[in-house]
Amino acid sequence: MKLLFANSAHVHASERLLLKGGRGRRMALRVRYGLVRHPDHGAILIDTGYTKAATSAPGRSLLLRLYGKLLKPTLLTDGQPDAFLARQGLTPQDISTVVLTHFHADHVSGLSLFPQATLITPGAALKALRNRGTLANLRHGVFAELIPDMTTQPIEDRPLVRTGADLPPAHDVFGDGSLLALDLPGHAEGHVGLLFPKLETPLLYATDAAWLLDALDPGKAQGRLAALISDDRPAAAASEDVIRRFRAKGWQVMLCHDPAPTAYDEAGH
């Protein structure tokens, strides 16, 4: 199995907001999404990043337009799904599955490009957002207009498997132990991280459980922005502790928004 991440956009924020005790320097946060090449299940996306559907497409709701003006994401043309997939010899039609970690706009806004794909996602959170009104969803940072009707399979239906001594279990997404979905609640309703235990050094993609890896170091903490936008701050703090336990066991940890390049990021983009 091969794993590669693209960067769909940059969002700028002060380090002081992201890291307790951080400086006032302005940081360009990445907005990653991933491509998995699975020997049996083909080409799989992890989230979809920011696309024009969230930032400039006609017909967006007033609330979504205001969201774009507030965050001001800068889309990267060569990081958009069609361009990224083309460099890998693929088209959007080749994507068999999208594994969705949660429902914030910077993770779902490209879903409409993949109508043929099966969506594997936190099922309870999807049901909840479908049953809520626009303003109630907004309180969770969710825009239902970005989430099209697709064939959907709940992550919760996948079997729970062990991840290691003193570590929490996770859902085996494909039943072969290659990709596991780990509950990391707090940042958003239904938020999960993804484990890749069969890589040479096992990897936890902790998605948005933190914005900066530095915030997970001993003696460090996230800035006040995390508390302001967390769906459940005590749960988020517990998830951070879970991530630290994985790091202590020798797992690599990767985040969606950390600006530093990783071994799994597409080189040169």
Image (cartoon, rainbow, N blue to C red):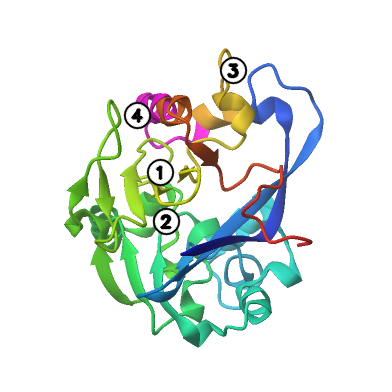
Label 4 Cα crowd, 10 Å radius (few <14 / some 14-19 / many 20+):
some
Where is mark 2, residue-wise?
A: 103
Point out the tag, 4 or 1, that comes first from the N-terminus.
1
Point out the tag, 4 or 3, that comes first from the N-terminus.
3
- Depth order, front residue of 144/201: 201
Do callouts 4 and 3 mark residues in contact (Cβ within 8 Å)? Answer: no
Label 3 Cα crowd, 10 Å radius (few <14 / some 14-19 / many 20+):
some
Point out the tag, 2 or 1, that comes first from the N-terminus.
2
* Residue at 51% across, 64% down: 2
Rendered image quadrant of residue 40: bottom left
Which residue range is magenta in the image?
228-242
Give the alpha-carbon distance from disc 4 to disc 3, as whole Å: 18 Å
Secondary structure under the numbered disc 4 in the rendered image: helix
Give the alpha-carbon distance from disc 3 to disc 1, as whole Å: 22 Å
Secondary structure under the numbered disc 3 in the rendered image: loop
Point out the tag, 3 or 1, that comes first from the N-terminus.
1
Do callouts 3 and 1 mark residues in contact (Cβ within 8 Å)? Answer: no
- Depth order, front residue of 249/140: 249
The x, y position of residue 239, in whole percent, is: 39, 31
The x, y position of residue 39, in whole percent, is: 40, 73
Task: Residue type at mark 1: give it.
Answer: Ala
Where is mark 3, residue-wise?
A: 220
Point out the tag, 2 or 3, that comes first from the N-terminus.
2
The x, y position of residue 98, in whole percent, is: 41, 69
Where is mark 1, residue-wise?
A: 188
Q: Is residue 71 above or below residue 210?
A: below
Where is mark 4, residue-wise?
A: 235
